[in-house]
Structures are given as structure tokens and as C-alpha cells.
Amino acid sequence: MTSHVLEWLGAYHDGELTAGRRRQVEDHLRDCSTCREELESLNELSSLLKADPPSLRTSPQRFAAHVQLRLPHQAARSTRRNTGQLPRWVLGAPLALIGIWAFLQSALWVASLVLAADWALGPRVMFFSNWITAEGWLGSMASLFLLHAGLLIGTAVLWATWMAFWWAWKQNLNFELSSNQIQKEV
Amino acid sequence: MTSTYGTIEEVDDRDLIACAQRGDRQAFTELVCRHQNGVIGLIYRMCGDPQQAEDAAQEAFVRVWQNLDRYKPQHSFRSWLYRIAANVALDSLRRERPSTELGSLPLADASAGPEQSAEERQRAVQVRKAIARLSPPLRMVLILREYQELSYQEIAEALDIPTGTVMSRLSTARSQLRQELLVLMEEA
């Protein structure tokens, strides 16, 4: 006979074993009276426990009415969502955009400073300028300025779009809440 | 809600929760009606006093309402609900009956129905006393499994413990109960 499966009997009794383990326990139970008795004892215990249903003093409707009376007013509950803390993504996404814009700005300013220093040191040094070439996209201050302006305008447009979406979402939420209120009043 | 789904009784729990999260009290009341027996039962078996259990169950549902926006639909609602109920039950045990002997619950239960014989009532009281003598962590796991019929995973989520701990606590609780109730089990 294989070793007992006592440690799995509780989970077997509760229907919590995987299919493979369940078959293993069932195979063992066919041949092992000790484990069968143990399982029988678990079943008896469950039957004994379940023979004592809870005795409720209050009817379900009355209990629900008591709960209703104790609920805080709806406005207090929805404050957090409507006027207090904004959802994290509303603030987080624009902040991430600003962060990206600031990073790009800094990177471009550093690059332009390096190039300026390179030019100031004269034609014998000009390591970076020769490397990038004068016709490259970073070759002139004018193109750098245009790039900065483009980034700024793009970020502003994204920001405005984002806020418009958020405003529309908030209006929709308010509409749903007021619809619920109207439905209850009706 | 009635225009979309027919009667509110036909609405799925998930839809009721979504409505309640938007502030719909009618939907929340339906949730209370559906789950009150489980919540009252859990607290009653934890603290042993029907009136205290109903008061605490009301408090549990108020906490559910106040925290509904924190509930994530991808988790089991029952686990989340019973987590709150379990906390309220433990708070209630600490607050209301700090010095009461758990084994000294009343022998006569006035709320028992007339159809229950004296012998059955006596047996029920012995079972309740045996459960009351378990330590609160063992008692909680046993009640959630045997009476509320939560899965091990749901119990683990409700009590924020590993599934292995659920199994070991359940095994210990059953072992202690079988020793306590040996005579009753043999009679049955």
C-alpha cells in the first residue's frame, strides 16, 4: 500500500484538489480504510456544523432598511471622485508629457552649448561640428529654435486635447450621477 | 435600471456593484439583500450574539458603501465583502466583549424556531460553543469555508493570507473541533 494521503483529505473534501491529485487520492481511498475513515469523519463534522443554521432576528427587508438609514449621504460619498482628488491618470499623463518636453529641451540646450563651445574653440578643434557636419539637422541655431518652438506647440496641443477629453469625461460622469438621482426621485 | 434589465432581482451582482459605485442606493440595497445572510452569519458565528452580529453587519455594509470605489471588479466581490465583514467582526469582538469567556455562550437560544427539538437545540449550542473555543484566526477560516462556502483562494484573499495558511488553519480547526465534538459525531 502507498503512504496515506491524510494531508490532502481536507482539500479533497472541500473540492480544492487538482484533477491529477484528486485521482491520486481517490485511487488511494479505494484501498485504504484508515483514510476512508478520516474522510468520513470530515464529512460527519461538516454535516454536524451545517445542521445549525444562523437564526436571524430581523427580516431581510428591515435589515436592508436599517443599513439604508445608516448610509452617509450620496454627495459625501461622491465628493472624492467629483471635486476632491482627481483620478491619478488625469494628472499623471500631462505631467509625464511635461517631463518628456523638459527632458528634450534640456538635451537640445546641452547639445547647442556643446556645439557653440566647439565653434568658439576654432577650426582646429571643431570636433563635434565636423562630426555632425554643418548641413546636419543640428547645424544651425535657427533649426534648433524651430525645433524648440515645434516641441512647445505640440505639447500645448496635446495638453489642450487631454484636458478636453478629461472635461468631457467629467461632464458625462456628472450626467450619469444626476440621472440616477432623477430616477430615484421619480 | 428596471427599464434596461426588467426587475432589479434579475440584475447580475457585477452590474449592481457598478451602479452602486456611481451612487445608486437602490442597487446597493439589492446587494445588501443578497449578501446579508452571509455577512450576518459570519459575524454571528464569530461573536455568538445575534443582536451584536446584526449591528456589526450593518456597520460592515456601511463600510462597503463608503469604500465601494476602491473595489476592483477583477477580484471576487465576496472575498472583498467578507474581508470587510471579518474586520468588523474582529473589531466587534475586541470592543464589545473583551472579557467574556467564549465558551460561556447561553445554552438556551430564544431565537430558535419551534420546529427545532430540545435535543437539536442542545446539539447546536454545543457546536457553537466548540466553535467559539477556537482561536479567532482558526474560527474565521473555518466559518468562511464551512458556512460561507468560500474557496481557499477566496478565503486567502479575504484574510490576506497565503492559500497554504488557509489549508493549515482549516486542518487545525477541524482537528480541534473533532476532538471537542467526538461524542456528538458518534451519536449522529
Image (cartoon, rainbow, N blue to C red):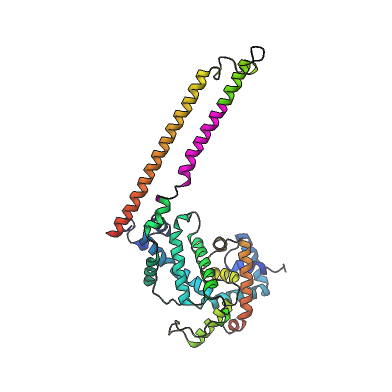
- Is residue B102 magenta-colored? no
Give the percent coordinates (x, y) of residue A168. Answer: 37, 42
In the image, residue B18 sits, relative to residue B102, either above or below, namely above
Give the position of the N terminus of chain A as an image quadrant.
Answer: bottom right
**In what quadrant of the picture does the C terminus of chain A appear?**
bottom left
Q: Is residue B23 visible in this depiction of the protein?
A: no
Residue that protrudes farthest toward the top in the picture: A123
- Residue A153 seen in the figure: yes
User: Magenta region: which residues?
Assistant: A82-108
Q: Residue furthest bottom?
A: B118
Residue A23 point in image, percent of width and height: 62, 63
Residue shown at 28% from the left, 59% from the top:
A185
On the image, the x and y values in percent for residue A151 come to 48, 28
Residue B16 rendering spot, x and y as whole percentages: 40, 58
Q: Quadrant of residue A157?
A: top left
Count of labels in the image = 0
Between B185 and B143, the one nearer to me in the picture: B143
Residue drawn at 42 percent across, 60 percent down: B13
- Dominant secondary structure (helix, strand or loop) of the stretch shown in magenta: helix
What residue is drawn where x is 47% and y is 29%? A152
Residue at 50 percent across and 59 percent down: it is B76
In the image: residue B115, left or right of residue A19: left
The correct choice, above or below, for A170 with respect to A124 in the image is below
As drawn, the residue found furthest toward the left would be A186
